Amino acid sequence: MCGFYFSTAPVIDDSFEDVKQRGFDSREFSGDGYCAIQSVMPTIHNDINFDVYDSVDYLFLFVGEVYSYDKSYNTDTEFVLDKLLQGKQVFEGMYAYILYNKHTKKCITGRDQSGQIPLYYSYTNGFTVSTTLKSMVKNLQPRPNPYTLEDWNLSKHYIFSQTCWQGISHVSPHENNVRVYNKPDKVKQTLKELKD
């Protein structure tokens, strides 16, 4: 399972129980204007290595599985991070990720083509992205979105970009975008611009 939460918005409830319960172990990250938590399951071959998630330049949060990753990497997480830094953004598997550049304050978010792993984001009081809604709702305190509640009741799935919470959207399957978190509008850029 696994999960993650990343935010530049103020944290009201730091329990993150919904993220923690999705993994065997979890680690919290914080830095200049952001906080994050990643829960993970041990890999078949290795113990949990949180070092791949946090470096001087980047914070990388990843959940899921890439089916055909190069086995010269210890894990599919290391493979995806390396390929993202090389400019590749689409992988075969089920996954969601955020790659945060600590210097430029830009994020790239993405999820798999079929949308098996949920990924939500909001620009409320900063930028927040998570694989679960509960921590987002607790910290952002949005109001219910009356326009989407009927759709949710009919389908029990987020088949539209809006969730049943105002200001919280769901990243469309196969969507890979660079988002500037300090601007209220979506900014789509290339991965090269994330590194610059």
Image (cartoon, helix red, strand yellow):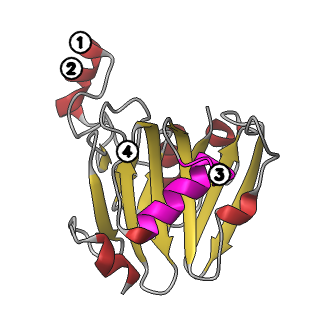
79 falls in the magenta region: yes
Residue at 75% x, 34% y is 44
**Sequence-wise, which precedes: disc 3 or disc 4?**
3
Q: Which residue is mark 2?
A: 150
Question: Spatial distance from mark 1 to mark 2, Cα to Cα?
Answer: 6 Å
Which amino acid, by three-letter code, is at mark 1?
A: Leu
| Residue type at the position of mark 4 | Arg
Residue 69: x, y in percent? 52, 45
Which residue is pictured at 17% across the width and 32% down the height?
147
Report if residue 74 lies within the magenta region.
yes
Mark nearest the camera among 1 and 3 is 3
Main SS class of the magenta portion in the image: helix
Question: In what quadrant of the picture does the C terminus appear?
Answer: bottom left
Q: CA distance from mark 1 to mark 3?
A: 32 Å
Q: Work out whether residue 37 or residue 100 is closer to the camera in this orientation and state it.
A: 100
Q: Identify the residue position indicated by label 4 in the image.
A: 111
- Determine the secondary structure under disc 3: strand
Q: Is label 1 in a helix, a strand or a loop?
A: helix
Residue hosting label 3: 38
Q: Is residue 125 visible?
A: no
Q: Secondary structure at mark 2?
A: helix
